Amino acid sequence: MKYIKPLISEIPWNYNWNYSAMSLLDRQSEGRQSGEQERYLQANNREFNSLFGYPNNSIKTSKYNALNFLPMNLFEQFQRLANAYFLILLFLQLIPQISSLAWYTTVIPLMVVLSITAVKDGIDDMKRHKNDNQVNNRSVLVLMNGRIVTDKWMNIQVGDIIKLENNQLVTADILLLSSSEPYSLTYIETAELDGETNLKVKQAISVTSDMEDNLKLLSAFDGPDTKLMQNGGKSAFKRTQIDHLMNVLVLWIFLFLCGMCFILAIGHYIWENKKGYYFRDFLPWKEYVSSSVVSSVLIFWSYFIILNTMVPISLYVSVEIIRLGNSFYINWDRKMFYELKNTPAQARTTTLNEELGQVKYVFSDKTGTLTRNIMTFSKCSINGKFYGDVYDKNRQKVEISEKTEKVDFSYNRLADPKFSFYDKTLVEAVKKGDRWVHLFFVSLSLCHTVIPEEKVEGELVYQAQSPDEGALVTAARNFGFVFRSRTSETIMIVEMGETRIYKLLAILDFNNVRKRMSVIVRTPENRVMLFCKGADTILCQLLHPSCRSLRDVTMEHLDDFASDGLRTLMVAYRELDNAFFQDWSRKHSEAFLSLEDRENKISIVYEEIEKDLMLLGATAIEDKLQDGVPETIITLSQAKIKIWVLTGDKQETAVNIAYACNIFDDEMDGMFIVEGEDNETVWQELRSAREKMKPQSLLESDPIDDYLTAKPRIPFKIPEEVPSGNYGLVINGYSLAHALEGNLELELLQTACMCKGVICCRMTPLQKAQVVELVKRYKKVVTLAIGDGANDVSMIKAAHIGVGISGQEGMQAMLNSDFAFSQFCYLQRLLFVHGRWSYNRMCKFLSYFFYKNFAFTLVHFWYAFYSGFSAQTVYDTWFITFYNLVYTSLPVLGLSLFDQDVNETWSLRFPELYEPGQHNLYFNKKEFVKCLVHGIYSSLVLFFIPMGTIHNSVRTDGKEISDYQSFSTIVQTSLLCVVTMQIALETTYWTMISHIFTWGSLGFYFCILFFLYSDGLCLMFPNVFQLLGVARNTLDWPQMWLSVVLSMVLCMLPVIGYHFLKPLFWPVSVDKVIDRIHHCMSHPLPPRIRTRLKHAGSRRSAYAFSHKQGFGALITSGKTLKAKFPKKNSFPFKK
Amino acid sequence: MTWSATARGAHQPDNTAFTQQRLPAWQPLLSASIALPLFFCAGLAFIGLGLGLYYSSNGIKELEYDYTGDLGTSNCSVCAAAGQGRAPPPRCSCAWYFSLPELFQGPVYLYYELTNFYQNYRRYGVSRDDEQLSGLPSALRHPANECAPYQLSAAGLPIAPCGAIANSLFNDSFSLWHQRRAGGPYVEVPLDRTGIAWWTDYHVKFRNPPLVNGSLALAFQGTAPPPNWHRPVYELSTDPNNTGFINQDFVVWMRTAALPTFRKLYARIRQGNYSAGLPRGAYRVNITYNYPVRAFGGHKRIIFSSISWMGGKNPFLGIAYLVVGSLCILMGFVMLVVYIRYQDQNDEDEE
């Protein structure tokens, strides 16, 4: 964050001041700003400002232009290890002494891979160019030579004075000079900066504020220097576990490859000594080969080239394509499209898909994520009478739904049409003129810091700092107590059609300690009244003893509200003696003006007057849950996903919501609350919680102690422990600060991970990220953070997967997320359908991909023993070129884009199916070794069966067919048939496209085979295409087909047997579920019973009020009050 | 990104089977009722096929003789000893006598077999110029670099055909003599030396360079034969359709073998009295012993073989099919047993 502090050195008379803009301490910009502490500029003096060489305001986020695209992109691509590896390989191939393969076997795949990536990068960059142009070419009014002219934003320079109008976008860091609004206020929206859509108030500094009517701003930081550009794009690139595993495996393969080359080089050495040496009559050694040692060194590299296909060149690009495809499915999913907001789900990162199928921990924000952040006034208790429930004729309580008849507010022309209320008795009471009800609503319409806005006569819009306040004022408005406008000294209320002006004497604003706010007003009848609203726990103690019985009744009602999960507030008033108030007012002013310990003095003064209150009643505001939240959470828990709620809200609120959405339930064996205020207490609390959950876990030799004593500290994983029951943990932000320190963090983690649900409240954004990091670091499981607000950004960035809810609080969370959608309940679809499929597909893809390359490459190894270890390839060079690229790419892509083991209904119905992903069962090092063994076996079959077949073989016309080229053709045909059959076995979901890809690729192979071996092509380039006529001669030989069938059967037999016997011998829980699904598939399903989840119980909730301070100070300050105030048409200025 | 500005539903994804991942699909299941019969059927089919292959391969007669001439093994050992360590070896002849008690059912093919000869060695295999062999005049004058060190002769002339493969052309020759009655004269059995190469090789792949003044010799003028050869390539045969690059012995040799032990067709016996096979009687094969193989431990064999409906003698496929078929059935039984036991266990669990 950058602050610009103007230092006035001249009288502001002709718009010509010197400014020194100071950039205050800011972590993120510190690096860049090294050195620049102050910025000198002269308003509207371009010549002067140009001396400092500030950049202009054009924004450039694109990386390439037409000229540098190719070199830059290639340079970037070759920085990737895999590409660099193949480049090195290419250079190796160009050395004639060791070149065992034609150069094009590497060049063609490499070019294809590079160009696919280049095209993708190019498209991305085109989009950025378009965005840049759009932003740069927005027009703005700028003061030039005394006249206001229209210019483009990109031409704005530091020091220019610009004029903005309502609802204009701002693309520079600017200093507010003045505005047309009262007090030189502006309302800005910073959605693109911090994601918050609520309007923020900015005020011009007093010296410039009365300059002129229109909004004037001074451009201070431009273009690449702006806060947004400085902070943007620095988020770390996320990689999935599979990515890491893949890198490890590629390294393994590489070592395996080197090992094989070494063995073959030794073999070559022996062969050259025993045979090659004597064979020199027919095949002399090359002049540079002086001994068999030299020869074997060269052969090492030759085999390195031949066996390079072990490290699959197209692996990374295929993985990218698959992830991209699976991301599109998320974008396309209509069941994750939120119609009301017209928002489809968005996969903003396309590289994390399969990790969605492995999530073990979900960290959720509360407000806006689990709840809608829409507060509605739903119930109240006035003078001991309960309002809000609806009863039918039989005095039975009616469940409120869409169909329930709403209360008619048509008598009130200023009512908010969106407000709905169902209990008619309250309206009747208002109409009857019940004194208490009236006073209750008057207090609601007076006691707040809401700022009204009336763009069109009669259409009021309230700007509230907390949604609770907005809800209360709106409720009062609808019942006929309309808060119409306010000045710094008056509040205008339309009470049942009659306009009354209250004189505002004082606002005793809300803060976290006081948990209440009061206003003191002088009524038109010249009575001084104090209205107070606040948390019941606090207010109870401030009540006048005379209202004890009323208090008891009200408390009962509050219990009822709380059990429904409502947010409650108590409302009270006090009539003040004029003299007493004058006395207090004087003390108040003194306290206000005191320089030392001001806050404390003020609060003491406040306490003096906020006592002996008369209770009016209580309000209940419903913090509406998002649709389907409890159901989603139940489903997530069934999949053994642990849900932690990390919220900035208070403990009571958070716990209440936790019950409401089934993170906690009444069947739980216990709930631990950690609220210690020092290390020792926190430690005690955590230990005792653990002792209760699993006493033996404290007795066992503690792995953590071992870990802590072990030096150096190796990466460590906390084992999963099963507690003796279901427990919940609630931890306070303050205690968490201690718990996250040093050795306590492991204690915390161990305890927390044994609990079914964890609620962390009063968290700062940083703590949210710390908690996520903690779990990430020691549990080695996949974490997902979901949130909607700017305060969730840090945890969204910290978690493996960040999900943004594009909802109430703006775009910031969404802009930093990897996946975004607008309803929490879409999470289950994201994880159980898309995530699971993506994971399964990716695992199948990897297993198959490694397998097919092993089977392909290792045949060379076996052939070495029969070809003098001479780096002779088994296959035709063109087959090697096309194998990964053409023949086998589509089937495996088809598999990894279309395969479904069970459809989405079953995926959602049986969350247990999700568990293998969490434990990474489908692809891990063990599975990889299986692929390797399978590949070795297949390669053995693929070599020895054709070898046996062609050994001394002749055709029916007596001509021999045991030549090298026929052998190649037989082996490669068998190989393709085998890998195609293998993928056919893996495929469980045969769409038309799968059929086309799988069988089409095989057919395509034969077409290419005939083409490459055709007379015309081979005669045109005899040295490039050498296998003239081989296809014809080999493919019409029946033994060849017998051999292919034999290889296929031999390769398939063990696989089928394994697939068949595995669930019988080594059953995993998933197998049973799948069995059940298959059973169910043949039988119709009973309809799923959906019960509305409602929790019962008696818990207190005493809160409401946001934790932000209200507008109180601003309203009462009145320092820069303008004469034209009040003003009807006050438009907010929107950024 | 502002969604609100657009009409409701404008961003709704398309409702197609593809985007919603609802493409109609066939979902096969590997259940016991499919897997077990599959194993048994495949097993039976394989055993049946294997038996057929095995018997038809066994029905093929082969007569082979190792004439390498390792010490004392045959009368070719004289030649072998004479050629020891001398390059080029002197011309030498030897013979193999054999007698057939009954008719050797035809058609009979004569093969030679080399062992321990690595025609599949990479450097050997690439040492050729297919452009030259396809009759391209430019390539004739400028053989490919792969041919080195048999690219240019000592005199600097381009070698035609160039390369190690051509240079090492097998140059032993055989003739077959038949003695119908004991003590009678030996009659030469006509050997058909044509039609021994692949049709595509002989007719398409290998081409002589264009004749100069109607003469093949002139076409090859300015080239040198490979150092091991005694005569230039255009004198390989007197038959104009069997000389030069399209000499069938040469074409057969140039199709390099996949394995270090290989057979190559030398001649077909199908003319005159011998079209039905070799009648009984005594035979003599005259062998011109030129080709040195003992240096690298190689062996030379001569083989007479008949042909069945499925080609030459190769018991491998038949045996392999029998083995795999039996394996299938064995595994089928194992799976059946396991499956039944598992079913019982499952039933118990459910009870």
Image (spheres, coloured by chain):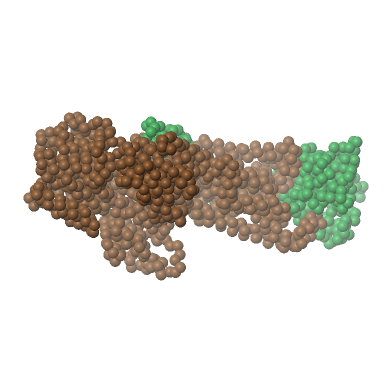
Chain colours: A brown, B green
Nearest the viewer among A645 and A1116 is A1116
Instruction: Name the quarter where the C terminus of chain A is drawn.
Output: top left
Residue A735 placement, left or right of A151 = left
Q: x, y (%) of residue A835? A: 43, 46
> At 89% across and 37% down in the image, what residue appears?
B212
Mark yes or no: residue A833 visible.
no
Image quarter for residue A151?
A: top left
Give the residue at the far left of this rendering.
A546
Q: Position of residue B282 (x, y in %)?
A: 86, 49
Instruction: Indicate whether A271 appears above or below A483.
Output: below
Q: Residue at x 59, y 49 (%)?
A: A75
Quadrant of the image occupied by residue A478: top left
**Which residue does the image show at 55% across and 46% down from the upper left?**
A317
- What residue sits 10% from the left and 39% below the top? A525
Question: Which residue is nearer to you in this view: A186 or A678?
Answer: A186
Q: Viewer-proximal residue, A63 or A827?
A: A63
Whether residue B151 is visible: yes
User: Percent position (x, y) of residue A927?
Assistant: 51, 54
- In the image, taking residue A483 as reference, residue A744 lies left or right, namely right
Tally the marks: 0
Q: Residue A544 versus residue A802: which sits nearer the camera?
A: A544
Q: Position of residue A619 (x, y in %)?
A: 18, 44
Q: Along the horizontal axis of the image, is A966 left or right of A608? A: right
Q: Specify whether A1014 is left or right of B276.
A: left
